[in-house]
Image (spheres, rainbow, N blue to C red):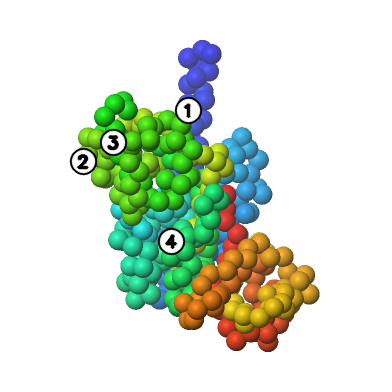
């Protein structure tokens, strides 16, 4: 390609960049005007963002992928929203955790992510309205549900207003090159379990596996310990300037974690929604079948059903249920009414848009 041809394309890109910049600022102006009209009302509307992203993907002619344009417009919306009010998002810290990555994926980089010492603290800060939303892990495709998040949702007044699905890649990290002298590996207990077979094959049995509060905490500890390695993601590796000894060491190639976004608001329908709830059933034969009959009778598709001890009495359980559709959809509303007629406890955790992958 000649210099003249290169110049032609570069000049065109410069002109297009100027047009994009002008259009972005026009969009931001409208977003700011909307904020002024709404005044002190709810700033963040998950259903509106989901509809915008769905529309953008439908309009996308390529060559950029649908996932790429969704990421770009997520950041555009994040910056425009920050003109009204930067959102504050609680997550299980320290910096560099997958939960922080999930929060940024959902809210964009203009949101302020706040590290908390525990999931409990993250919930409390949002319940007290000190922060706006909490992002918390709820289940992993390999290791199952995150019990503490489920337990907190039983009693918390917060409502689910979104979900995030994140591919999880674990790396073995150290503050120097080479495996020589590694005596212990720090990681969250779920990360140790997700990498169990790789660790068995690649590390001596004498290397101690030490569970810690989070993978980012593991990276921080390995940063100061010359005989330690850590299992963590790329963000933690960069945050603590660690060397990657091995990459993508998770045993399952499709290792994925689902996170929920919780706040104080209800979310309107989008046409592609999920409803999460907690129900209790009496401890007697056939109780679960009797309880779930309204779900099947109204043609509602159930995507999750999981039991947890209720903590109210010995051998008492509550059931976490996810169904397709919004609580305002006629068939879902009818199923919920049927559930309420058959049990003393039904708590709708929220209806919210399906995750944008």
Q: Which residue is mark 4?
A: 135
Which residue corresponds to the image point at 21% horizontal and 40% vertical from the top-left?
Answer: 224
Question: Looking at the rendering, which quadrant does residue 235 occupy?
Answer: top left
Q: Which residue is mark 3?
A: 183
Query: Residue 203: percent from the left, percent from the top?
Result: 39, 32
Residues packed near mark 1 inside 10 Å, few (<14), some (14 to 19) or many (20 plus): few
- Badge 4, how many Cα within 10 Å: few under 14, some, many 20+? many
Give the secondary structure at mark 1.
Answer: helix
Residue 244, x across and y down, in percent:
36, 32
Query: For the residues carrying marks 2 and 4, which lies nearer the camera in this image?
Result: 2
C-alpha span from label 2 to label 4: 29 Å
Q: Is residue 58 visible?
A: yes
Q: Considering depth in this image, is 10 or 247 the residue closer to the camera?
A: 247
Classify residue 166 as left or right of residue 286.
Answer: left
Disc sitting over residue 11 in the figure: 1
The residues tagged by marks 2 and 1 sit, at their Cα atoms, a distance apart of: 50 Å
Q: Crowding at label 3, few (<14), some or many (≥20) Cα neighbours within 10 Å?
A: some
């Amino acid at each position: 390609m000649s210099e003249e041809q290169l110049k032609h394309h570069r000049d065109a890109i410069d002109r297009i960049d100027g047009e994009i910049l002008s259009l972005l600022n026009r969009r931001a102006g409208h977003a700011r005007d909307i904020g002024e009209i709404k005044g002190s009302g709810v700033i963040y509307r998950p259903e509106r963002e989901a509809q915008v992203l769905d529309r953008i993907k439908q309009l996308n002619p390529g060559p950029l992928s649908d996932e790429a344009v969704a990421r770009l417009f997520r950041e555009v919306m994040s910056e425009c929203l920050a003109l009204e009010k930067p959102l504050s998002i609680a997550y299980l810290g320290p910096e560099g955790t997958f939960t922080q990555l999930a929060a940024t994926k959902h809210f964009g980089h203009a949101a302020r992510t706040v590290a908390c010492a525990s999931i409990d603290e993250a919930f409390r800060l949002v319940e007290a309205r000190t922060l706006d939303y909490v992002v918390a892990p709820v289940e992993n495709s390999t290791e199952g549900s995150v019990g503490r998040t489920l337990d907190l949702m039983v009693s918390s007044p917060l409502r689910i207003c979104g979900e995030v699905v994140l591919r999880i890649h674990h790396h073995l990290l150290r503050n120097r090159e080479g495996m020589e002298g590694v005596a212990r590996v720090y990681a969250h207990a779920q990360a140790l379990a997700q990498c169990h077979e790789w660790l068995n094959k690649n590390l001596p049995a004498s290397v101690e596996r030490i569970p810690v509060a989070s993978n980012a905490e593991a990276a921080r500890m390995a940063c100061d310990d010359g005989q330690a390695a850590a299992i963590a993601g790329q963000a933690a590796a960069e945050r603590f300037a660690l060397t990657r000894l091995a990459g993508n060491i998770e045993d399952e190639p499709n290792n994925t974690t689902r996170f929920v976004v919780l706040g104080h608001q209800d979310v309107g329908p989008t046409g592609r929604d999920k409803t999460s709830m907690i129900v209790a059933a009496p401890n007697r034969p056939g109780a679960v079948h009797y309880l779930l009959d309204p779900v099947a009778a109204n043609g509602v598709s159930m995507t999750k059903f999981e039991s947890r001890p209720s903590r109210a009495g010995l051998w008492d359980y509550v059931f976490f249920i996810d169904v397709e559709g919004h609580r305002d959809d006629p068939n879902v509303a009818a199923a919920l009414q049927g559930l309420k007629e058959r049990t003393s406890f039904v708590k709708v955790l929220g209806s919210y848009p399906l995750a944008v992958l």
